[in-house]
Amino acid sequence: MSNFKPSDEDFEHRVRSNFDQQQVMKTIGAEMTHVSPGEVHIELPYSEALTQQHGFLHAGIVTVIVDSACGYAAYTLMPTASEVLTVEYKVNFLSPAKGERFLGIGKVIKPGRTLTVCSGKVFAYESGSEKLVATIMATMMAVMK
């Protein structure tokens, strides 16, 4: 549980509505499964259409779910009249992304008025076991509408 207090009481609706507008998430079949102040989870079922030549989930797909999880985690704490954009990120791939489903978790480390620093993890689940496949450090920017 985070100690962050959103400035927008209706942050969860705002975040979920914004997520629903992302065509890439619809295309890959990702779903936002958890939203709390400073933390967002995005789940993705395995799809052969999203793999690379060895049958693992492609690194770009791994990155898209955790980048979005971090962005939306930051967005939970941003003002109502804002949007969120990624400024930069660094990803470490720790294990091949092999599993039945994948979970990207984004968490705010340090919120700011303009820039918010986040960390994230991606887990693969297969036959009841969990494996950490990637970590991310990301900086998100609040863009006023």
Image: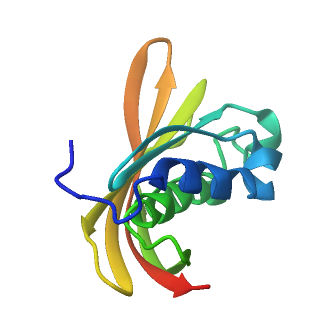
Residue 64: quarter of image: bottom right
Image x and y of residue 93, in percent: 44, 56
Q: Nearer the viewer, residue 47 or 54?
A: 47
Q: Nearer the viewer, residue 116 or 95?
A: 116
Quadrant containing the N terminus in the rendered view: top left
Image x and y of residue 39, in percent: 36, 50
140 left or right of 110 in image: right
Image x and y of residue 50, in percent: 76, 44
Q: Residue at x 46, y 55 (%)?
A: 11
121 left or right of 104 in image: left
Image x and y of residue 129, in percent: 40, 18
Query: Farthest top residue?
Result: 127
- Above or below residue 107? Residue 82 is below
Query: Farthest front residue?
Result: 9
- Above or below residue 98? Residue 126 is above
- Above or below residue 117? Residue 113 is below
Q: Residue at x 33, y 52 (%)?
A: 37
Q: Residue at x 75, y 57 (%)?
A: 21
Counting every numbered tag in the picture gives: 0
Q: Residue at x 43, y 48 (%)?
A: 40
Coloring basis for residues: rainbow
Quadrant containing the C terminus in the rendered view: bottom right
Residue 106: quarter of image: bottom left
